[in-house]
Image: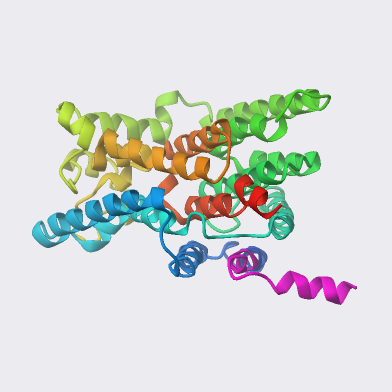
């Protein structure tokens, strides 16, 4: 019986293969000198492309065809103007437009991917324990303030949170022990933005309806907010609010847009505009985030905030377009409006401090969302 169960675990659908890889590199990170697998992000990128390749054998769903054309048109025109005409380094262009070509690939994937809810539930249970043990060891044994499994925990925790949420909503499972483990992982992480995202999603995962379990749900939520408070105070370390890096980045963003008019707010700066010498000099210690051209130029990526970057580079209209299409993808997949809005809320929260829609961790999490959607389960039942 054990051999048969083991064989079923490994004989999986092609769309489920990346999760076995994620578990493998998660375990592998325990035995590496730097305590994380430095190519994990690349593997997530490849996994997203892998899913896309297996999704192009059928037509794009009708609702997404216009979206695909708009995104393709926007990317091609921007490439011609930025790379061919202005001769901006291609890698700088690719980094700035990442969220848009992720979305373009996602509208091809939407509606075509299927992951077994049972198999996903098993993978999430394994990942939870890998995260918890790794974070606990790094915190208590090696005294790491920000534990890592795959990469910077701001990225990996949002992936874990979103797939946990999608799994919880789609199969209606309320495993409160898993909620507690998830909460402890986020508490150990030392990440303010991740704790805030957890606090936002917890009510939607634990309080689907008013019943006898609501008291337990409120207790979990209370401790989540308490954990967020302690993480925030611990990271503040006795300094004022203005000492927080993200606040500094926001002030520099305001400096960069000081002369903007309505047109700029709607459509952003000229594609792709470098930041001022003043901002680049203030943030010179982030030399690795400077332009790939190596000429000392820096772009909005150095502001460490997706929402600041997308508004600066693309404007409010295209920023809203991104959020709206992700919302529509989740609604069409069968999620309730409040569930879809809560996911968008998490994306907005994480966009205040990290790359959010500009990274493969969020992209793969959304793939999971459409692959185990409530609509899929209704169609198969």
Scheme by which the image is coloured: rainbow
Left or right of 69? Residue 180 is right
- Give the quarter of the figure containing the N terminus: bottom right
Left or right of 161? Residue 212 is right
| Residue at screen point 52% across, 37% down | 346
In the image, residue 107 lies at what x, y percent? 42, 54
Q: Residue furthest right?
A: 1
Classify 255 as above or below 181.
above
Q: Which residues are magenta?
A: 1-21
Residue 151 is inside the magenta segment: no
Classify 48 as above or below 221.
below
Asked if residue 287 can be seen in this view, the reply is no
Left or right of 322? Residue 142 is right
Most frequent secondary structure within the magenta stretch: helix
In the image, residue 351 lies at what x, y percent? 43, 39
* Quadrant housing residue 190: top right
| Residue at screen point 38% across, 30% down | 247
Asked if residue 300 can be seen in this view, the reply is yes
Residue 19 is inside the magenta segment: yes
In the image, residue 186 lies at what x, y percent? 64, 41
Classify 184 as above or below 104.
above
| Residue at screen point 63% across, 43% down | 165
Classify 376 as above or below 18.
above
| Residue at screen point 52% across, 64% down | 40
In the image, residue 171 lies at what x, y percent? 71, 46
* Quadrant housing residue 35: bottom right
């Amino acid at each position: 019986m054990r051999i048969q169960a083991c064989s079923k675990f490994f004989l999986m659908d092609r769309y489920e293969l990346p999760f076995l890889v994620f578990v493998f590199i998660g375990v592998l990170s325990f035995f590496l000198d730097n305590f994380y697998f430095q190519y994990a992000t690349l593997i997530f990128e490849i996994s997203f492309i892998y899913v896309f390749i297996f999704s192009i054998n059928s037509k794009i769903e009708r609702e997404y065809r216009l979206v695909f054309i708009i995104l393709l048109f926007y990317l091609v025109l921007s490439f011609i103007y930025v790379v061919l005409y202005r001769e901006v380094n291609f890698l700088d262009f690719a980094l700035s437009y990442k969220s848009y070509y992720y979305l373009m690939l996602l509208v091809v994937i939407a509606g075509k991917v299927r992951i077994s809810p049972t198999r996903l539930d098993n993978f999430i249970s394994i990942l939870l324990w890998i995260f918890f043990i790794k974070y606990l060891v790094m915190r208590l044994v090696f005294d790491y303030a920000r534990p890592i499994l795959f990469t910077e925990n701001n990225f990996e925790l949002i992936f874990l949170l979103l797939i946990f949420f999608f799994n919880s909503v789609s199969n209606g499972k309320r495993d409160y022990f898993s909620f507690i483990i998830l909460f402890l992982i986020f508490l150990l992480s030392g990440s303010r933005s991740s704790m805030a995202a957890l606090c936002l999603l917890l009510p939607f995962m634990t309080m689907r309806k008013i019943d006898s379990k609501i008291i337990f749900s409120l207790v979990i939520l209370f401790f989540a907010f308490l954990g967020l408070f302690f993480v925030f105070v611990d990271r503040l370390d006795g300094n004022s609010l203005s000492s927080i890096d993200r606040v500094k980045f926001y002030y520099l963003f305001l400096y960069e847009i000081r002369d903007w008019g309505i047109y700029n707010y709607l459509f952003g700066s000229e594609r792709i505009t470098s930041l001022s010498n003043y901002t680049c000099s203030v943030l010179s210690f982030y030399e690795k985030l400077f332009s790939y051209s190596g000429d000392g130029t820096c772009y909005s990526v150095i502001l460490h905030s997706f929402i600041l970057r997308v508004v600066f580079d693309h404007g409010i209209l295209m920023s809203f377009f991104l959020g709206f299409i992700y919302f529509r993808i989740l609604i069409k997949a069968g999620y309730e409006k409040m569930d879809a809005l809560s996911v968008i809320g998490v994306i907005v929260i994480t966009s205040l401090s990290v790359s959010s829609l500009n990274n493969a961790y969020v992209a793969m999490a959304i793939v999971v969302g459409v692959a185990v959607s409530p609509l899929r389960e209704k169609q198969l039942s």
